[in-house]
């Protein structure tokens, strides 16, 4: 099984976030602290985008198809090997 690493960047507008918080009544120093904390959390985590998830799902589907086809051929070979012995 292969491993894929996604490098997704998320844009976070701290100024807009601070403005929204201050408009809703939160004091500006607290709003700035929250914006900095949220920005650090978003940068420190590996977040998957929808495109990342779609790519991973496509990869998994192809892996499943390969396994199913391989197992089907193995079953067919086993049946064709055993069938003549059962008939005889």
Image (cartoon, grey):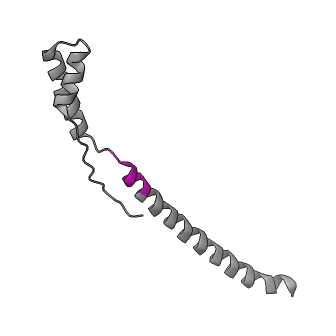
Please name whichever residue, 8 or 86, is drawn nearer the observer in this view of the structure: 8
**Image quarter of residue 55:** bottom left
- Residue 62 appears in the picture as rendered: yes
Residue at coordinates 43% horizontally, 55% vertically from top-left? 54
Q: Say left or right for 10 vs 88.
A: left
**Image quarter of residue 4:** bottom left
Would you say residue 49 sits in the magenta stretch?
yes
Quadrant of the image for the C terminus? bottom right
- Residue 37 appears in the picture as rendered: no
Residue furthest left in the image? 29
Q: Say left or right for 86 vs 56.
A: right
Position in image of residue 56 (x %, y %): 42, 57
Residue at coordinates 51% horizontally, 62% vertically from top-left? 61
Position in image of residue 16 (x %, y %): 20, 29
Residue at coordinates 42% horizontally, 64% vertically from top-left? 1
- Residue 65, compared with residue 36, is above or below; it is below
- Residue 74, compared with residue 25, is above or below; it is below
Secondary structure predominantly adopted by residues drawn in magenta: helix
Position in image of residue 23 (x %, y %): 23, 17
Q: Say left or right for 58 vs 9.
A: right
Position in image of residue 10 (x %, y %): 26, 43
Residue furthest right in the image? 88
Please state the extent of the stretch shown in magenta in the rendering.
Answer: 47-54
**Image quarter of residue 84:** bottom right
């Amino acid at each position: 099984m292969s491993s894929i690493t996604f490098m997704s960047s998320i844009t976070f507008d701290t100024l807009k976030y601070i403005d929204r918080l201050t408009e809703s009544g939160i004091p500006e120093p607290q709003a700035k602290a929250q914006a900095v904390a949220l920005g650090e959390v978003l940068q420190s985590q590996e977040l998957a985008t929808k495109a990342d998830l779609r790519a991973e799902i496509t990869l998994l589907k192809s892996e499943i198809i390969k396994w199913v086809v391989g197992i089907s051929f193995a079953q067919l070979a086993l049946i064709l090997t055993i069938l003549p012995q059962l008939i005889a």
